Image: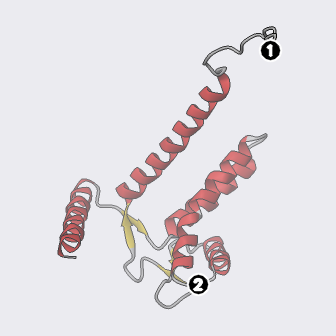
Amino acid sequence: STENLLNDLERAVDDAVNCVKGLCRDGRFVAGAGATELELARQIRSFGEACPGLDQYAISKFADCLEIVPRTLAENSGQNATNILSALYAAHAGGNINVGVDIENEGVVDATEIGCVDLLSTKLSALRLAADAATTVLRVDQIIMAKPAGGPKPRKPQAMDAD
């Protein structure tokens, strides 16, 4: 138990040091509590609706992926995720782009008013890494589907034994 506690403490100190380093590089913050992800999803979805062809489906799915953050916050706090997402979309459509999931009092709240903010550089890095990971998976999938499988060629049928 003591070793686990020390490991948790080490991670907490490491996270705090990295946060201060990021803050010194770029001191900008964005709203937390899933507000940023939901607003990005809303903006990306509206961009996707304006795109012609099959691209709009990929863009829409990317927006769906961003909704996972506020949905997970709502589910883990014991709230109905569908109702929370509806309330968030309504608030964001009304111009309140800082509204996020309220995990303490249930419902939605302006994240900046309660001091729930995230470092912009952390959000950008996470989004960049997620997009790179998805692109890598798709590239590997295309390579696998494009190349015929290697390995030995099937043998030709031979005559049966006299036994």
- Front residue of this view, candidates 81 and 97: 81
Where residue 15 appears, x then y in whole percent? Answer: 25, 63
Q: Position of residue 124 (x, y in %)?
A: 42, 52
Q: Nearer the viewer, residue 1 or 89?
A: 1
The colour scheme used to paint the residues is secondary structure
Give the residue drawn at x 70%, y 50%.
Answer: 48
Q: For residue 96, what is the image quadrant?
A: bottom right
Where residue 106 sits, quadrant-wise, is bottom right
- Which quadrant is the N terminus positioned in? bottom left
At horizontal 49% and vertical 80% (from top left) the residue drawn is 110
Residue indicated by mark 2: 79
In the image, residue 146 lies at what x, y percent?
A: 66, 23
Say whether residue 43 is visible.
no
User: Quick one: which residue is furthest to the front in this view?
Assistant: 163
Identify residue type, mark 2. Answer: Gln
Sequence-wise first label, 1 or 2: 2
Q: Is residue 102 left or right of residue 58?
A: left
Relative to 159, residue 39 above or below: below
Which numbered marker is on residue 27?
none
Q: Quadrant of residue 151?
A: top right
Report the quarter where the C terminus lies: top right
For the residue carrying disc 2, how many other residues have a C-alpha within 10 Å: few (<14), some (14-19), or many (20+)? some
Residue 68 position (above or below residue 129): below
Would residue 6 appear left or right of 110 to someone viewing this image?
left
Residue kind at label 1, given as amino acid type? Asp
Residue identified by numbered label 1: 163
